[in-house]
Image (tube, grey):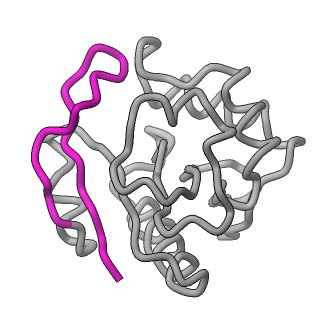
Amino acid sequence: MMIRTATIDDLDDINNLEKICFPENEAASFESFKERLNHFPNHFWLLYEENVLVSLIDGLCTNIEDLSDEMFDNAEMHDENGDWQMILGVCTHPDYRNRGYSSILMNHVIDECRLQNRRGIVLTCKESLLSFYKKLGFVDEGLSDSDHGGVSWNQVRLKF
């Protein structure tokens, strides 16, 4: 197993994993990932198992305290010195789920964000994933204002 940050050369693999993991209305576009990688490649964490991209987490940093839908498509909102790490996507290939990869990668991201002196991490998730994030120390803040992909999302936060 190897964890590393992304480069623009990872764009196709990242895009392919996203398309496998999310329905079309929720998945980030190729162009969106390209913009994100141009603005914050060091905030894309990739987990590989035997040269296969198994899991990824990406997001921007900001001083804004709540995740907004605008952040998904506006990579220019990234502020490298921002207090909060916003997580825009968490993906694990279906063939590798229920093996702990998402937890391993999320714990790596949590450690990285602590080292970067962030105030914490914010993400939105479906209700069915709340227990996963709670096990990692996130607190459910209830339904968010997000309607990304036409779906209801809960905002969860991990404060350091």
Residue lying furthest right in this view?
Answer: 9
Vertical comparison of 43 with 94: above or below: below
Question: Quadrant where the C terminus lies?
Answer: bottom left
Residue at position x 23%, y 48% in the image = 155
Q: Is residue 143 magenta?
A: yes
Q: Position of residue 13 (x, y in %)?
A: 73, 36
Please provide percent x and percent y for residue 111.
Answer: 51, 82
Q: Quadrant of residue 106?
A: bottom left
102 vs 125: above or below: below
The residue sitting at 44% across, 38% down in the picture is: 94
Q: How many marks?
A: 0
Measuring 73% from the left and 66% from the top, which residue is drawn there?
Answer: 4
Q: Nearer the viewer, residue 42 or 55?
A: 42
Left or right of 142: which side holds 2? right
From this viewpoint, which residue is outermost toward the front? 63
Q: Residue 38, percent across and down?
A: 82, 41
- Residue 27, magenta (yes or no): no
Q: Which of 36 and 93 lies nearest the eye of the viewer?
A: 36
Q: Quadrant of the N terminus?
A: bottom right
Q: Is residue 142 above or below residue 65?
A: above
Magenta stretch, residue numbers: 139-160
* Residue that sits furthest to the left in the current view: 142
Give the left or right position of residue 138, taking residue 61 as reference. Answer: left
Q: Find residue 75 and report its horizontal and vertical position in percent.
A: 66, 37
